[in-house]
Image (cartoon, rainbow, N blue to C red):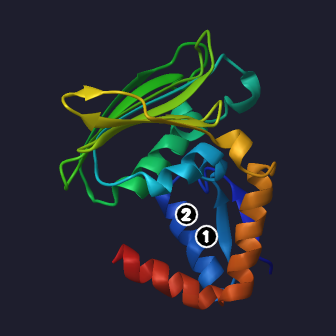
């Protein structure tokens, strides 16, 4: 009977997640999923720049590590980018196209997903855990700018569109501009703030209303 911070993914199936949420509602408790990339300094700086994305491309690549082979690459790596994209696009999904293949394990090690949203935005998402290099980048295109987010180096490049060309006019070195606090610290702080500011039952009521 306690509030919890759960490592992503919250569960393996949607039905399991629904059961967990019902359990939290019944016991008037808070559940927070540890999507730590949401607290990446580069992403947090994006809020003042983002307007209405029309196309998003993301690459999350990593060398093979046997640590997380109990789940596929979508639940291991791509889930970060899917979570971020759903948050910034703010539209229902119209169509999903996906492909992937095993390479070094028995589950999917490399995958590509194309998300088409009702508002016209398209996101092309690639994740691999069998790459020769580490890369965590997202490129966002909107009517007035091209925005490049580097999650690994925690930097944000902004290229406003002017006179039919893109010239970089702003580069935020987010890691230097923000206090040195880990994403985990920020995640715990948010959970504690949520617990103190409202009851869990009221929170889940808002979640259910939004989902409906």
Identify the residue shown where x is 58% and y is 13%.
131
Which residue is drawn at the image coordinates 81% and 48% (left, top)?
180
Q: Give residue 80's quadrant in the image.
A: top right
Q: Which of the 4 image quarters holds residue 187?
A: bottom right
Residue at mark 1: 20
Q: What element carries label 1?
A: helix
Rendering coords of residue 208 (x, y %): 44, 80
Label at residue 62: none
Mark 1 residue crowding within 10 angstroms, few (<14) / some (14–19) / many (20+) = some
- Secondary structure under tag 2 reads helix
> In the rendered view, would you say 95 is above or below 132?
below
**Between 195 and 158, the one nearer to me in the picture:** 158
Q: Is residue 43 visible in this depiction of the protein?
A: yes
Quarter of the image where the N terminus is located = bottom right
Q: Which residue is drawn at 43% across and 57% down?
A: 87
Q: Position of residue 33 (x, y in %)?
A: 64, 60
72, above or below 43, in the image: above
- Real-space Cα distance between discs 1 and 2? 5 Å
Crowd rating for badge 2 (residues with CA inside 10 Å; few <14, some 14–19, many 20+): some
Q: Identify the residue under disc 2.
A: 17
Q: Quadrant of residue 23?
A: bottom right
Query: Which of 71 and 204 lies nearest the eye of the viewer?
Result: 204
C-beta proximity under 8 Å, tags 1 and 2: yes
**Left-right relation of 119 to 45:** left
Q: Is residue 2 left or right of residue 44?
A: right
* Nearest to the observer: residue 132 or residue 150: 150
Q: What quarter of the picture does the C terminus occupy?
A: bottom left
Residue located at (74% from left, 59% from top): 186
Q: Give how far across and how far down residue 133 sits, in percent.
A: 62, 13
């Amino acid at each position: 009977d306690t509030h919890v911070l759960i490592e992503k993914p919250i569960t393996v199936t949607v039905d399991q997640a629904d059961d967990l949420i019902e359990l939290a509602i019944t016991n008037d408790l808070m559940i927070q999923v540890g999507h730590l990339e949401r607290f990446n300094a580069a992403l947090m700086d994006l809020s003042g720049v983002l307007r209405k994305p029309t196309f998003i491309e993301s690459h999350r690549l990593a060398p093979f590590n046997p640590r997380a082979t109990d789940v596929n690459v979508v639940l291991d790596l791509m889930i970060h980018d899917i979570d971020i994209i759903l948050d910034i696009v703010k539209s229902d999904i119209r169509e999903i196209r996906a492909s992937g293949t095993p390479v070094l394990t028995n589950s999917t090690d490399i995958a590509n997903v194309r998300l088409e949203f009702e508002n016209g935005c398209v996101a092309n998402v690639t994740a691999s855990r069998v790459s020769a290099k580490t890369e965590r980048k997202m490129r966002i295109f909107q009517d007035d700018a091209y925005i490049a987010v580097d999650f690994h180096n925690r930097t944000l490049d902004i290229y406003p569109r002017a006179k039919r060309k893109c010239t970089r006019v702003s580069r935020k070195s987010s890691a230097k501009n923000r206090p040195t606090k880990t994403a985990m610290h920020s995640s715990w702080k948010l959970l504690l703030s949520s617990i103190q500011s409202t009851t869990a039952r009221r929170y889940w009521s808002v979640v259910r209303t939004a989902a409906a």
